[in-house]
Image (spheres, grey):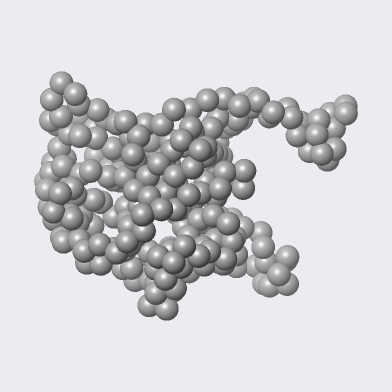
Amino acid sequence: MKSLCFTLSGPAACFRQPDVNTQVYFTYNNIHKVALLGLLGAVLGLSGYRNAKLHGQEERVFPEFYEVLSSLLVSVVPNGKNGYFTKKIQYFNNSVGYASKEKGGNLQVREQWLENPSWTIFLAQHNLDDVVWDKLCSNLLQGQCVYIPYLGRNDFPAQIEDVLMVELSPSRQSRIDSLFLYEGDLKALDGGGPSRYLFVETAPIGLVPNYNFYEFRRYVFTNGTIPEAALPSFLYTDGDRQYCFY
């Protein structure tokens, strides 16, 4: 299987969690599939959320980027130690005047940011339209994009480097070197020795029609082994490491 591979990074990122009702906005640790499709949509010039009225179009069931790219398969390999990136709380003021109804119109924001995140991304066409796939590959290989891609917010421009086409083969090994979706018993993930690590995060995997709420799944990153019966469907190897596509 042909796959487009690249390194995605930046000095900071914030993939804001929508279910936080505190004084601090928290971020997911890794870029999730919806955010990654949005970034690729920017590369292709596809519209995002709430753009229909702006462009005089009818409301869509899904944002254009998701409608076009949702059949694309992705694999994400965190380049941070044990899949984890340093996070820090940033404090700043939004004083544009209309951001808050408090006296003075000043909104005080506390937000968690990822520091120097980096991922190796693999893309597979799967059921994506041939024309869209060819255009996406062409733009990335030539370093071109219609809109500026960013990591969660337009304050954090994304760096896309080391873009190349690779050949992957189907595989069914018990060790997965990328993020993968897993709903089974975490205690069944064995191995790893004394340096074993297990990173688990519930994050978006898709969108619900019309209202576009997130659909959530459990992402796992570990150096342990996965029971054969629980191995995901789309596993591929480059001869060195095994990647899960979702």
Total marks drawn?
Answer: 0
Pick out the residue farthest to the top: 194
Name the residue: 28% across, 37% down: 221
Residue name at image x 39 percent, y 74 percent: 134
User: Residue 56 at x, y = what percent?
Assistant: 73, 72
Indicate the quadrant where residue 234 lies.
Answer: bottom left
Percent across and percent down for residue 72 are: 37, 64
Quadrant of the image for the C terminus? bottom left
162 in relation to 102, above or below: below
Q: Is residue 23 above or below residue 123?
A: above
Question: Splitting the image into 4 quarters, where does residue 108 fall?
Answer: top right
Query: Which is more toward the observer, 64 or 111?
Result: 111
Give x and y (percent) for residue 41: 51, 62
- Using the image, determine if residue 64 lies above or below residue 22: below
Please identify the quadrant where the N terminus is shown.
bottom left
Q: Is residue 26 left or right of residue 122?
A: right
